């Protein structure tokens, strides 16, 4: 087990992509999140999973309890806006009748799941029914209105004609269905970030069973951390079943070094914000959730 102050605890880190062509067609990166959940469903490791599908407005994510491959596939692609994934956690074990719940989401949502497992406040049945968590890397998120302003004002694209959005190489990228690509410097997006993200001290979903993101691996591939015993069991089974192509992370560029650099930048910057809250007022402080 490797214990890294910026990358969390993990058993192994690899670069990977799905071998499922249908999943890859619309996946954000290597289709790891979708492939893991469909495989876990087919194997009976989970009987349903919380994912983020498109909601009522274009590119507005909506949490959804998926119980079929088809529904899990509907959640492919990153929506850069807040999707309250955990709002369905308890309900998944109630009206949906699930015994083995999967959860996908960003770092803070993995934290919420672990907290509910260890301190279940009005969360009866939840601790024992979480079966698999797949966490995404996350630098920051945006309220829907912010994302709309970024795409429609700054990138000058109509949200309903957008095919994919991506943050990478210092830019916010917007790809349209008809093949147009617009970019804007990330500098321009900072003021639109969700303020709550500025006290977040987790970049690579440290508390997930398996975490994945784009940074570190080439386009179309994902960087994957196998963290827990459960994560390792599912991952090994999936690789043995031919679900993934893998490469040692040491053999790909830019590799783990860039993941580490970005994680350090996020955590150091946000730690400073947490510190500053202690002396925010005159003789009074703002609350520190980590105290
Ligand atoms: C807000 C946000 C910020 C991110 N920032 C980074 C980053 O800084 N660096 C980096 O390397 N990667 C980042 N990612 C992760 C990256 O964009 C991909 O989501 C990840 O690599 C998974 O790709 P995939 O091909 O395996 O997923 P796919 O197989 O395409 O599946 C997409 C998965 O993402 C989930 N999802 C989509 N939108 C949301 C959402 N808004 N909230 C919660 N879950 C969602 C779906 O439920 C699904 O499980 C971010 C993701 C999000 C949602
Ligand atoms: S930056 Fe942290 S708090 Fe904000 S959405 Fe990402 S994981 Fe959650």
Image: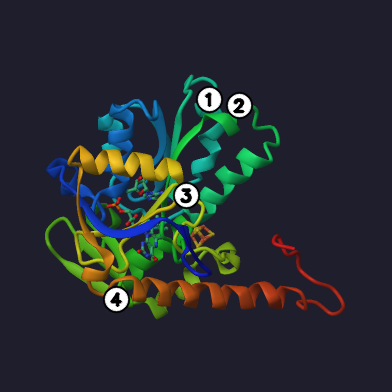
Distance Cα–Cα, label 1 vs label 2: 7 Å
Whichever of labels 1 and 3 marks the residue nearer the N terminus, that label is 1
| Whole-percent x, y for residue 253 in the image | 23, 73
Q: Which mark is residue 125?
A: 2
The residues tagged by marks 4 and 2 sit, at their Cα atoms, a distance apart of 43 Å
Residue of label 4: 169
Q: Which mark is residue 93?
A: 1
**Chain-order first, disc 1 or disc 2:** 1
Residue 56 shows up from this direction: no
Label 2, residues with CA under 10 Å away: few <14, some 14-19, many ≥20: some
The residue shown at (35%, 27%) is 67
| Alpha carbon separation for disc pair 1 and 4 | 40 Å
Mark 3, residues whose alpha carbon is within 10 Å: few (<14), some, or many (≥20)?
many
Which of the two discs, 2 and 3, labels the residue nearer the N terminus?
Answer: 2
Q: Are marks 1 and 2 in contact (CB under 8 Å)?
A: yes
Check residue 208 in the rendering and tell me which mark sits there, or answer none. 3
Name the image quarter holding the C terminus.
bottom right
N-terminal of the two: label 1 or label 4? 1
| Residue for point 21% across, 62% down | 175
Could you classify mark 4 by the number of other residues whose Cα lies within 10 Å: few (under 14), some (14-19), or many (20 or more)?
few
Labels 3, 4: front one: 3
Local secondary structure at mark 1: loop
Q: Is 272 on the left or on the right of 153, as rendered?
A: right
Direction from residue 266 to residue 232 in the image, left or right: left
């Amino acid at each position: 087990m490797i214990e890294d102050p910026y990358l969390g605890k993990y058993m192994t880190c690899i670069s990977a992509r799905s071998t499922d062509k249908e999943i890859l067609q619309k996946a954000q990166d290597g289709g790891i999140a979708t492939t893991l959940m469909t495989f876990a469903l087919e194997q009976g490791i989970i009987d349903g999973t919380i994912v983020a599908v498109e909601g009522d407005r274009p590119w507005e994510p909506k949490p959804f309890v998926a119980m079929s491959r088809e529904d899990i596939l509907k959640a492919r692609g990153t929506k850069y806006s807040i999707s309250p994934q955990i709002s369905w956690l308890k309900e998944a074990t109630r009206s949906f009748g699930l015994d083995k719940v999967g959860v996908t989401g960003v770092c803070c949502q993995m934290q919420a799941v672990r907290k509910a497992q260890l301190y279940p406040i009005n969360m009866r049945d939840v601790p024992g029914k979480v079966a698999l968590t797949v966490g995404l890397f996350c630098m920051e998120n945006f309220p829907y209105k912010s994302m709309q302003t970024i795409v429609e004002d700054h990138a000058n694209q109509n949200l309903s004609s957008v095919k994919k959005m991506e943050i990478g190489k210092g830019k916010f990228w917007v790809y349209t269905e008809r093949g147009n690509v617009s970019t804007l410097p990330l500098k321009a997006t900072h003021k639109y970030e969700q303020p709550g993200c500025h006290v977040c001290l987790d970049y690579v979903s440290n508390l997930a069973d398996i975490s994945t993101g784009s940074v570190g691996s080439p386009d179309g591939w994902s960087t994957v951390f196998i963290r827990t015993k459960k994560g390792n069991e599912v991952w090994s089974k999936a690789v043995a079943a031919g679900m993934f192509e893998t490469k040692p992370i040491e053999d790909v560029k830019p590799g783990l070094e860039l993941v580490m650099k970005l994680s350090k930048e996020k955590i150091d910057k946000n730690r400073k914000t947490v510190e500053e809250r202690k002396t925010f007022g005159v003789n009074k402080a703002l609350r520190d959730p980590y105290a």
